[in-house]
Every structure is written in structure tokens, then in C-alpha cells.
Amino acid sequence: MRRMIVKHDFDFPDQTVHKGTILDVEDEPAPNGLVFILSGDLKYRSVHIDHLDELNVVEIHQELLQRREEVAELMRRLELAEKAGENAAREVNRLSAELEQRKPVVLPGEVAKAIEWARKSVRPTNRDILEYVINPDGSYPTIVEWGRTNFDELLEALVNGYTIKEPDIRSEIQMIVEDSKDDYEMIDQLADLFQTRLDQEGSSDFLVE
């Protein structure tokens, strides 16, 4: 009896014998090339010797070692991929938390109004607005003037949102006084502003030093 390996798939009427199957067969084939299988589920069936090859234990052992190395390499890659996925998930969570904690940029009222006007009328993209700041052509002068000295804040405001800075009452009063001179209408505006601020403060003891 000798042990041989199947070289390629072949069929019996009721089943297929696959390549790589090891069979115990008789030592010498019959004149027609058939050998009897001497063990296993196929015992006493005959197969042509051309379907079989000598079993080289050394080669099989080497192939087995190679397959083990391939499996080990695949497992290593899988582990690296899983770690990369975990790292990516952690980074996404970190960035999400950072975005949630990030406070909106506080923009001057006139800048915020200019941005809103531009978005409602001309509808430029954020990139368009930033390009106007970098290469001004007369468009959006309020945004451009502020953005040239506050570019990072403008970029973050366009991308992540913003709030409007509440005007300082002293600045407002100073602007009205400088513009009013003998203009009583301006003086009335100043009085209205005081009243508005008093109402906002909810106190009759509001005092500007």
C-alpha cells in the first residue's frame, strides 16, 4: 500500500474527489492504469493512476508551514486594521466633542449683518468670501476690512457659525455725539438709546461713567 495525493478534481457517480485529497492505494496499478483505493469512504473503488501523484511529505510540510505563515500575516493585518479602526473612531469622537465644545465666534454687528446680506442677496460660498478678503476687488468692504486683520476668526465663523457682539453703549454714545453737533435729531437718537439701554438693563439707576 502506498499513500498518494489527488492531482485534480475527478468524479465518481455519487461524489467528487477534490484536489489535495490523500488516498491509500495499492502499490502497483493494473495494466489499464487503475488502482484500488484501500481505505476510507472510497475503499475498493478504483481510480486511474493519472489522477494521482506521489505524496511528498516534505513538500506538504513546507506548504503547510507556508499556509500557516500566510494565515499569521492575515491575522496581523486584521489586527492592525482593527486598531486603525479603533483609532479612527476615537479621533472622530474627539473631533466631535471638540466641535460641540467650541464656542461660536463673536462677530461685530456690522460684519455679521454684511455676511447675512451677502448670503441672502449674492449668495457667495464661504470660499468666495475668503477669496475677496485675500484679493479684494471692492466687494463686501465691511467683511474685507475686518477679515484682513481677523482672518482666522472669519474663517472659523463662516465654517462653524457665529454670534453677534453686543454693541458697547459708550461706543454708541460717542459715535452719536460726534455726529450730532447741533443736530437735534441725533440728540433725540441719543436719548432713545439711553432709554433702550435702561430698559435692557431693567434698572433706573443705569449710569455711564
Image (tube, rainbow, N blue to C red):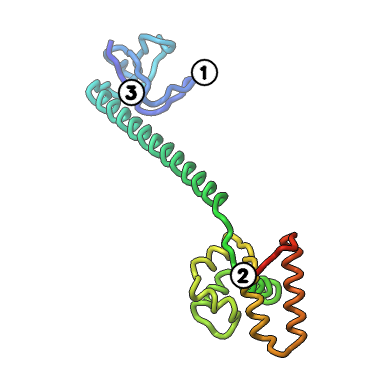
Q: Are marks 2 and 1 in contact (CB under 8 Å)?
A: no
Image height of 43 relative to 125, above or below: above
N-terminal of the pair, mark 3 or mark 2, is 3
Residue on which disc 2 sits:
209
Q: Tell me the element at label 2.
A: loop
Identity of the amino acid at label 1?
A: Asp
Quadrant location, the C terminus: bottom right
N-terminal of the pair, mark 2 or mark 1, is 1
N-terminal of the pair, mark 3 or mark 1, is 1
Tell me what residue is drawn at x 75 percent, y 76 percent: 191
Residue on which disc 1 sits:
14
At which x and y percent is residue 184?
76, 86
Identity of the amino acid at label 2?
A: Glu
Looking at the image, is mark 3 or mark 2 nearer the viewer? 2
Identity of the amino acid at label 3?
A: Leu
Tell me what residue is drawn at x 27 percent, y 24 percent: 60
Give me the C-alpha separation between circle 2 and circle 1: 105 Å
Q: For the residue carrying disc 3, how many other residues have a C-alpha within 10 Å: few (<14), some (14-19), or many (20+)?
A: many
In this orientation, which residue lies closer to the viewer: 126 or 64? 126
Q: Quadrant of residue 203?
A: bottom right
Image height of 78 relative to 88, above or below: above
At which x and y percent is residue 199?
76, 64
Give me the C-alpha separation between circle 3 and circle 1: 19 Å
Give me the C-alpha separation between circle 3 and circle 2: 106 Å
Image height of 127 relative to 21, above or below: below
Q: Are marks 3 and 2 in contact (CB under 8 Å)?
A: no
Residue on which disc 3 sits:
52
Looking at the image, is mark 2 or mark 1 nearer the viewer? 2
In the image, taking residue 115 as reference, residue 156 lies left or right, namely left
